[in-house]
Image: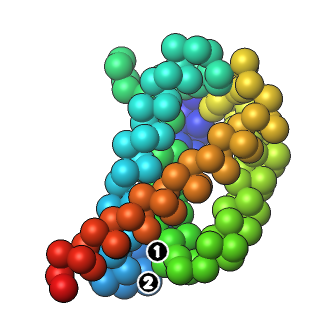
Amino acid sequence: MRKLTIYVLLMLFIPWLSIPLLGRSSFKRYLPGTIFMSVYVTLEGYLAEKKKWWWFPYPIKPNVLAEMPLILGPFFVGSLWTLKLTFGNFKKYLLLNVIIDTFFTYFMMNWFKRIGYVSLIRINKFQLSLLFLLKSILMYGYQYFHELVFARKSN
């Protein structure tokens, strides 16, 4: 259990070490889409817990989703980087997301299950991949819409 706690803490904090490389303007620009999707994924986590889509046997604290380290670490920071590297080129964005999501679904999920962090219960890996694809499209759409509205307000 102590080893798992160390893995979870590293997963939460290591991605944040790359934030200075992102740049202040990119951080501010892509923060709205990232926050929107992080809130969405958190709400999805509560639904998934209720519907038993996946199971986290590792409790963080009572009434706190055990997937919060994933959401606040690699997901949050990874979303910022993905938007920075690909926003404005939807095909590139989608391709990068498919690669990242496939790696997560088919490799990281196996490792997470092995260390006792999470297991899929009522959805399979293909369904999880489709869920990730849908969220990727939703985040891009939100960021695109946000920039349209923000650009109109500044003109």
Q: Quadrant of residue 27?
A: bottom left
Q: Is residue 92 above or below residue 14?
A: below
Side (left or right) of 90 relative to 13: right
Seen at 80% across and 49% down, the residue is 107
Labelled disc at residue 137: none
Secondary structure at badge 2 equals: helix
Side (left or right) of 10 relative to 33: right
Q: Nearer the viewer, residue 71 or 10?
A: 71
Outermost residue toward the left in this view: 154
Indicate the amino acid at tag 1. Ser
In 3D space, how far apart are the residues under numbered discs 1 and 2 (Cα atoms)? 5 Å
Residue 49 is situated, as x and y percent measured from the top left of the image, at: 53, 19
Residue labelled with disc 1: 18
Q: How is the image coloured?
A: rainbow
Classed neighbour count for the residue bearing mark 2: other residues with Cα under 10 Å, few (<14), some (14–19), many (≥20): few
Residue labelled with disc 2: 21
Q: Is residue 88 above or below residue 109?
A: below
Q: Badges 1 and 2: C-beta atoms under 8 Å apart?
A: yes
